[in-house]
Image (cartoon, coloured by chain):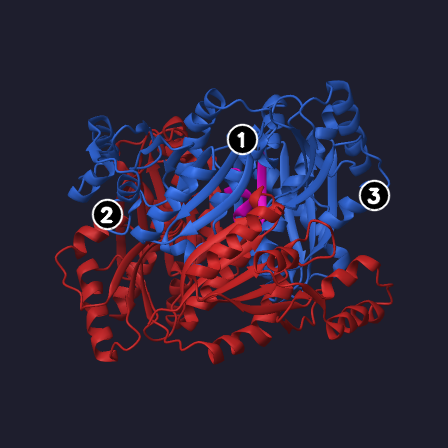
Chain colours: A blue, B red
Amino acid sequence: MQVIAEIFSQGEEIVSGQTVDTNAAWLSQKLVQMGFVVKRHSAVGDNLTDLKKLLQDVSLRADFCICTGGLGPTIDDLTAQAVAEAFTLPLQLDTVALEQISRYFSCRKRDMVDINRKQAFFPQGSQRIDNEWGTAPGFSLQYNQCWFVFVPGVPYEMKNMFTATIARQLSQRFVLQPEQLITLRSVGIGESDLQQKLNTLILPEGVQLSFRAAIDDVQTKLIFPRDAEQPLVRATVNQVAESIGDYIFAIEGLDDSQGGLVEVISQLMRQQQLTLSVQETASQGLIAAKCIAQPWLISSVFNLSLQQQTEKLAIADYLNAAVSIAENRQQQDGTQLVLVQLYEGNTEQFQQKDQSIKLFTVLLTPSGVIHKQRSIAGSNTRKQNQAAIYALDLLRRYLQNKTR
Amino acid sequence: MQVIAEIFSQGEEIVSGQTVDTNAAWLSQKLVQMGFVVKRHSAVGDNLTDLKKLLQDVSLRADFCICTGGLGPTIDDLTAQAVAEAFTLPLQLDTVALEQISRYFSCRKRDMVDINRKQAFFPQGSQRIDNEWGTAPGFSLQYNQCWFVFVPGVPYEMKNMFTATIARQLSQRFVLQPEQLITLRSVGIGESDLQQKLNTLILPEGVQLSFRAAIDDVQTKLIFPRDAEQPLVRATVNQVAESIGDYIFAIEGLDDSQGGLVEVISQLMRQQQLTLSVQETASQGLIAAKCIAQPWLISSVFNLSLQQQTEKLAIADYLNAAVSIAENRQQQDGTQLVLVQLYEGNTEQFQQKDQSIKLFTVLLTPSGVIHKQRSIAGSNTRKQNQAAIYALDLLRRYLQNKTR
């Protein structure tokens, strides 16, 4: 039996287009993975009449609805009031919620202001959903055929609350038969090239193939029917992985979750007890920033003067220049690994989205130098991100090849 | 009189979360700027019953609805059929549309396949909307109180069709008077404190006040009625700005757009011909990364060893340590300004979202040292971002105070 879910986003910033509603897509993915059929997304602004009407409509057609936003302390945060009025359930003070809110402020050495009290009032009969990541707790309640969950719209809080509490409650409350989702995460290859590589592959019946370009990687997704047997799943995944090749840095959904590029690198750096120094140019701090709080990252330096010097290099000299910078850094920092990235192209080429720059990435290792060359284009922030990702991917390839 | 608009996105990839619906936000922004009140976004999948029901509902409550997606050639593209069935209007061949579609293919030296013929059938009484950017034309029609426009979901085609044709049709068809939006952008103060500061303020009638927490700043938004006079708008904005104080770094919508924190800083750094070096700890590269391609950022350094040394400092010594690091960096780099940020707290406190760390931010300037102390909490990436923002904000305050 299908279990129907809807997603409901509340906020003027959504309907007026100030904010792209990424929450809805994130939640849909999670719900589909769990086995829900997501039938509709709706977004309305801070308007009590619209909110109430939508809540009533949803209560009659969905089995589950998750609502984001409108739980803040200010006058335009109307969700709890709308629920109370739509379902004729008076708002009541939840003393535990109040206690949690005031603790949130005292931990941050700030005074709780009066308007935050409002966030501790829930419609009668609601269950509180703790929020350790922000001020506003969420709440859940059943009305008509639908179980409603209300969470803040701040993505960081919403995602944490979903993972920590709501996902478990959903699997207890509903009989769900999830499809099996396997995600192959890759760097350095685009969606259309991925599709080209898999064109001739014949997938077993009922297996769905799709692609998704995220900011830091491209994901190839395989959805297997609920009852697909494990040997078939593994054989198919292996076949797809082989066709794609070593662009893949992680396969999720088969065994343990492997996570993003930095998580994969971090695990290997720790296992192999290695340390790293970085010299950044086009990435300008972003390699270091992506490796936040990793004990193996010893230093990262960005110098505008280095970038200006390298602009004068002949194209044949970039590689040698990068290697000699790496050797200097190794002497200074005593790290086993040094990652140096230079780029050919001037400031204007870097800034113009239609112009490309050429990256020279060098990794100095105990067993010699490995390097890679690559052109990138797009806005300056896109170039910056791609530069950081390609540098980290060179490191990932070195670490994974050592263990293969 | 309010002219009510809705946005309706069609596609399994939207409701299943494979694609983030950026079209809806883009269209909303355009419509709000034109003077529409956008009341609702809805997304449904490739399901004829759901589509028909939604079309009927919208036709009774909106003055205008723009629908994206579902105009492709394949069997899961159901929009035209749903419109035909929902409004009992038979599908009819538009020969000009067919001609356009076949020309699209012949221009690209490709054969038009039979299934593309489907894209030339529109519900009786529709007006075709030419699409020079892809295969599928769009169409428009009036039903009940609502004027519907149907366009493809491909962002590039949709945006071009909106700009080339639809925007003009809208201004001819509706009497629109855009509201005036002013945004006051601030750093270092939360939504509830902002509201508290503005609680006693009496706004002129018809002025709407709202708040929005973005990643890097908090925005106070004032919407003035279409016919509000400029002196009143300015006086009100000044009053609000004064109540909030120097947390505000930019006011948008009054004169020229001022942009984000880094854009504001950048303008002042260039005007005052200043240069900057940075020493990062908690921000770990993110201060530099946020200042991508700014010619006044001379260097940025992150060292794990510095972080480890400062962990051993007594609380009273942080400020002096930061100043002496700043002086060293100034000698090395010759920059007029040096930003150094240290933090009290060990790695575990940094990693734990419930634990706070204390930031000591120092800015060395030609006229002496300014500094600020501040506690931050949250996940490590949140701490990292807050640290970078607070460091940049200290710089912004120095630069703006100089010019006041």
Which residue range is magenta in the image? A276-291
Q: Classify the position of the N terminus of chain B by image quarter.
A: bottom left
Q: Considering only vertical position in the picture, is A203 above or below A75?
A: above
**Subunit bearing disc 1:** A
Of the residues shown, which amino acid type is indicated by label 3? Asn
**Subunit bearing disc 2:** B
Q: CA distance from mark 2 to mark 1?
A: 38 Å
In this view, the residue in front, B190 or B181, is B181
Q: Considering only vertical position in the picture, is A372 above or below B158?
A: above
> For numbered disc 2, what is the local secondary structure?
helix
Q: CA distance from mark 1 to mark 3?
A: 33 Å
Of the residues shown, which amino acid type is indicated by label 2? Ser
> In this view of the protein, can residue B99 be seen by the observer?
yes
Which of the numbered marks, if any, corresponds to residue A199? 3
Q: Earlier in the sequence, mark 1 or mark 3?
A: 1
Label 1, residues with CA under 10 Å away: few <14, some 14-19, many ≥20: some
From the image, tell me which residue sits under label 2: B192
From the image, tell me which residue sits under label 1: A3
